[in-house]
Image (cartoon, grey):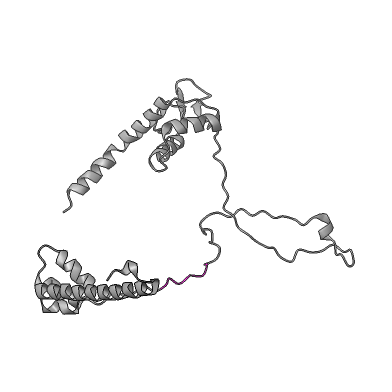
Amino acid sequence: MNVADTNPQARIAYLERELHWAQLKIQLLEEKLRQRRIQMLGPQSETLSNLQLELLEAEPSVTGEEVEAEAAREAIARKPARERKSHPGRQRLPENLPRVEEVIRCAEPDCRCTACGSETEVIGYDESEQLDVEPARYFVRVTKREKRACPSCEQGGVKAAPLPERIIEKGLASNRVVIETVVGKYCDHLPLYRQVAILEREAGLEIGRVTLDGWVMRVGELLEPVVAGMRKDLLGGT
C-alpha cells in the first residue's frame, strides 16, 4: 500500500496502526529482556524492578547473595518535603561579654508633660544590645625601676629592682606585642607584612618585617621544650 497516494485521513490511520504495532513490539522485547535477566540472575530477581535488574546485569560478577540482598531491600521512599522552620528570633549576644551601658536622655521638650507642663519622671528603659568593639590602642609602656642607696654612707652601694624577663631582650616591643604578632600570624592567618602595615598605620611606627620574623623565631625557640614534651607524649602512645 502506497500511503503517499491516499488521502490524509487514510494516511493518519495507517500511521496510527504502525505506531500501535511498534509499541506492542517494544513491550514484547522488554518482557523478553526481563525474562532473560531473571533467568540469568536467579529466582530472587523476579521481585526486582527493571532498573535494579539493569544495574545488577551491568556488574561483571554479581553473586546470588547480592541478588537476594537487593531483592530484600525496601524501595526507597520519596523524601518528604522539608518543613520550613520558624525563625528562632534575634540571636542573643554572649553573656560573658562585658556590658557598657549608654543612657540616651529624652530631648528637653519630651521631659515636660504635654497636658500640665510638669517635669516627667523616668519610669523605665527600652533596652537593645549591639556588638561593639574598641580599636586597638597602642601606647608606650614606661618601666621605672627603683634605684636605692644609703643616705648615711656610700659603702652600701646602689641597688635596683630587677628587670622583668622579656621575650625580646632590649627590644622595642613588649611581650604582649610579640605574642599578638604570633597569634595574628598563626591563628588569624595575618601575614607579617600586613602586620607591619598595621603597626605603621595605627602606631606610626616603622618596623621591618625582618624584625617581626625575629620575634616569631624567638617565640619558637622558647616553645621548643613544649614541643619536645608533646612529641614524647605522642610517641609514647599506642
Foreground of the two, 215 or 91? 91
Foreground of the two, 188 or 176? 188
- Horizontal arrangement in the rendering, residue 30 relative to residue 76 (left or right): left
Residue at the spot x=25%, y=72% of the render?
22
Residue 86 lies within the magenta run: yes
Residue at the spot x=54%, y=39% of the render?
136
| In the image, farthest residue toward the front | 5
Magenta segment, which residues? 81-87
Residue 88, compared with residue 35, is above or below; it is above
- Horizontal arrangement in the rendering, residue 27 relative to residue 205 (left or right): left
Foreground of the two, 145 or 14? 14
Residue at the spot x=43%, y=38% of the render?
190
Residue 233, compared with residue 197, is above or below; it is below
Q: Quadrant of residue 67?
A: bottom left
On the rendered image, what quadrant is the N terminus found in? bottom left
Observer able to see residue 143? no
Q: How many marks?
A: 0
x and y, in percent, of residue 186 in the image: 38, 40
Residue 58 lies within the magenta run: no
Residue 70, compared with residue 184, is above or below; it is below
x and y, in percent, of residue 77 in the image: 32, 75
| In the image, farthest residue toward the top | 154
- Horizontal arrangement in the rendering, residue 22 relative to residue 121 (left or right): left
On the rendered image, what quadrant is the C terminus found in? bottom left
x and y, in percent, of residue 111 in the image: 82, 60
Predominant secondary structure, magenta span: loop
- Horizontal arrangement in the rendering, residue 146 relative to residue 230 (left or right): right
